[in-house]
Image (cartoon, rainbow, N blue to C red):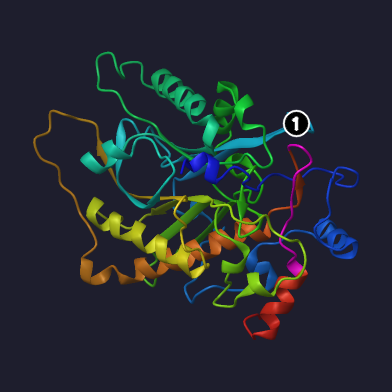
Amino acid sequence: MNRRRFMGTTLGGLSLWPLAGLTQEITASPRLQERVEDEPRKRLRELGIRIGTLETGPHNALTDVEGVRVGQTTIIKGEGKGAARTGVTVILPHSGNVYEENLWASAFNLNGWGEMTGVAPIESTGLLRTPIFLTGTYNVGIVYGAAMEYLSRLNPGMGVTEETACPVVAECFDDFLSDTPSRPINTDDVFKALDGAKPGPVAEGAVGGGTGMMAFGFKGGIGTSSRRTGDKDTVGVLVMANTASRSELRIDGVPVGRKIKGFNPQPGKTRSIILVAATDAPLLPFQLKKIAKHVALGLAQAGATSHTGSGDIILAFSTADRIPRDKRAPFRDVRSVSDFWITPLYQAAVEATQEAILNALTMARTIVGRDGNTAYGIPLDQVRRIMMKFSSID
């Protein structure tokens, strides 16, 4: 079956104010609906829920890996049939020019009904040579073209006197809230995200590429988290969550999705998730492949089973070594963590991934989008009450 037909009514989106009068159909009681719409959004730890045992970085975000920056453009236009609820999220892997100073990287295709361009060169060379872009499915070509324009401006010799580079652009389908065929993103939107990329806290929920996304039957989107090992190595994860069904949702092992009342989900649709992991530990591509596989374990701990039509693709890179784009050097000196000492990094990847996915959920507000379709933010009061019942909350 065609993936786009399979995913034809995917939920997701970004918050609009006020919601009163925009909702076509209420799928929860008015009392529950009013409560969740007015509820301030909080990250998982602000709810008293802590995943795993490792410490987080200062921002509990991908940007805790030094040099990594994130920029986002959120697009909210119109109402009704032509409404747009989409955007782009950009990850700059280090503070310099990644085309001139490459990073070791690898990817893992857990379930390949989605797209991440630029993966073949990464798997062939072990090198990440461009920023990473996350967006909606129908926007991939536009974002790819803008990425090539950005790289060409920054590197005038690229594709002329020097080799070209294939941008990394990954997608999830955001048609429930957004009029995807209108392809509302343009080059300026991508450059705005690039220009706004910065270290520090990262906006989460229905922002950037996550504007039109859905996760576990509720509003999803962008989420991030980080962990530090005993050796003070950092692993950060950022996700664009558009995945799984509500019955699958687990928080710290608790079957929260099955316990929540109201807000009836849209049935029978398969969704996707893009996950990006970064670390400052010196890892080689074969080790980063294993980090990416352990990111998949974090996705599983959140409850996702990666359905047939889901595009679940993971990219992992290390910022520890910058590899100059110098074809004249016949040899390169490299270093890496011994595989006998890598297990704490696996734990960090698993914990950070699970929390990043859950942050995408808890930070996303209810939104109304195309044709009045509504994606509800997960009711945080119910989440906290369920977790307290299972003694999984501080």
Q: Quadrant of residue 347?
A: bottom left
Question: Magenta span: helix, strand or loop, mainly?
Answer: loop
Res 282 visible: no
Seen from the viewer's position, the closer of residues 274 and 173 is 173
Circle 1 sits on which residue?
81
Q: Quadrant of residue 329?
A: top left
Magenta residue span: 370-380
Q: Position of residue 393 (x, y in %)?
A: 65, 80
Q: Position of residue 182 (x, y in %)?
A: 63, 25
Residue 310 magenta-highlighted: no
Q: Position of residue 221 (x, y in %)?
A: 61, 49
**Depicted 382 relative to depicted 222: above or below:** below
Seen from the viewer's position, the closer of residues 204 and 175 is 175
> Where, quadrant-wise, is the C terminus in this rendering?
bottom right
Left or right of 12, for residue 239: left
- Residue at 51% x, 50% y is 272
Seen from the viewer's position, the closer of residues 304 and 328 is 304
Q: Position of residue 109 (x, y in %)?
A: 35, 50
Res 70 visible: yes
Q: Quadrant of residue 45?
A: bottom right
Left or right of 67, for residue 204: right
- Residue at 48% x, 77% y is 53
- Residue at 50% x, 52% y is 238
The residue at the far front in this view is: 1
**Depicted 312 relative to depicted 197: above or below:** below
Residue 374 magenta-highlighted: yes
- Amino acid type assigned to the residue bearing label 1 in the image: Lys
Left or right of 357, for residue 266: right
